Image (spheres, rainbow, N blue to C red):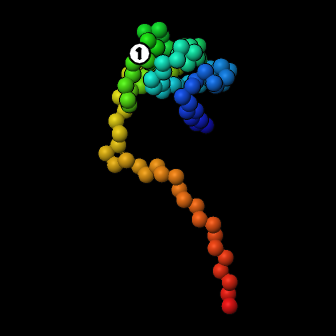
Amino acid sequence: MFLCLATQMPRDIPIGTLSQVGTFIVHRLINHFDKESIANASSSANKSSLDFLPVLGAGEAILIGVDFPMPVMMKLYKPIIEPDSATPIFKPKTQSHAH
């Protein structure tokens, strides 16, 4: 099973839930409590890698997890052809009356 949790505030996820996550992709975090949540939930997160979190730029992230012996710095680029992520427009089904 695969589950993805995405949040801008890791401190809002209960520590029991967060500690069961095997891999984190952590983007810029400037709040001390958010950084502490990640540090407490991940045994592979070290202080030096967490010190980079407030200064990460757009598209930069740190990959932390049980399958990685050390945190990995990542740079994510926008796709050449951006996906259409607009909210779909739902139209109510019209009733047709047979005459």
Measured from the top left, where is residue 89 in percent x and y? 54, 59
In the picture of the structure, the residue carrying the numbered disc 1 is 52
Residue at x 39%, y 22% (from the top left corner): 56
Q: Is residue 42 above or below residue 7?
A: above
Residue at x 48%, y 18% (from the top left corner): 30
Measured from the top left, where is residue 66 in percent x and y? 52, 20
Residue at x 58%, y 24% (from the top left corner): 10
Residue 27 visible? The answer is yes
Q: Is residue 76 above or below residue 37?
A: below
Q: Is residue 24 above or below residue 51?
A: below
Looking at the rendered image, the quarter that the C terminus falls into is: bottom right
Drawn side of residue 31 relative to residue 59, left or right: right
Q: Amino acid at mark 1?
A: Phe
- The image quadrant of residue 53 is top left
Looking at the rendered image, the quarter that the N terminus falls into is: top right
- The image quadrant of residue 63 is top left
Instruction: Report crowding for label 1: few under 14, some 14 to 19, many 20 or more residues within 10 A (C-alpha).
Output: some
Residue 42 visible? The answer is no
Residue at x 49%, y 14% (from the top left corner): 45
